[in-house]
Amino acid sequence: MARRGGFPGGGMGMPGNMANLMKQAQKMQRQMEESQKELEEKEFTAKSGGGAVEVTISGKRQITSIKLSEEAVDPDDIETLEDLIMAAVNEALRMIDEESSASMPQLF
């Protein structure tokens, strides 16, 4: 008579396939942690306005530097400077996201 339920192969321990899956999951966890640490140590620099604004952001998503050219600083046109800073910050964040996606191990 066939047994019902349980895993094939009998025994009280974890079936072989389940143990292998656990090992693979642990390995993937370590790889993800290493990738995250490497990403956090990098810096990403983006420019806007033809280089008038340069923003550097760490992999931890902290702004580490903002450089402005004299031409970008016009007291009569602060809105343009704000837009240039926003564009450079958004581009640097996009670069971080892209790097993060590329460096993480694929599940399948």
Image: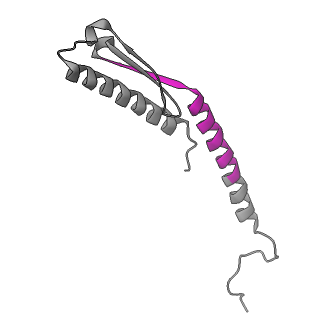
Extreme-bottom residue of the structure: 1
Q: Quadrant location of residue 31?
A: top right
Q: Quadrant of the N terminus?
A: bottom right
Counting from the top left corner in percent of width and height, residue 95 is at: 43, 29
In screen coordinates, is 2 left or right of 55?
right
Colouring mode (rainbow / by chain / secondary structure / one colour): one colour
Extreme-front residue of the structure: 75
Counting from the top left corner in percent of width and height, residue 89 is at: 37, 28
Instruction: Please give the name of the residue rendered at 56% of the width and 26% of the height, measured from the top-left corner.
Output: 42
Counting from the top left corner in percent of width and height, residue 29 is at: 65, 48
Counting from the top left corner in percent of width and height, residue 78 is at: 22, 20
What span is colored magenta in the figure?
26-48
Q: Quadrant location of residue 106?
A: top right
Extreme-top residue of the structure: 70
Instruction: Please give the name of the residue rendered at 35% of the width and 31% of the height, measured from the top-left corner.
Output: 90
Instruction: Please give the name of the residue rendered at 81% of the width and 71% of the height, measured from the top-left corner.
Output: 13
Instruction: Please give the name of the residue rendered at 53% of the width and 34% of the height, measured from the top-left corner.
Output: 60
Residue 32, compared with residue 21, is above or below; it is above
- Residue 29 among those drawn in magenta: yes
- Camera-side residue of 108 and 89: 89
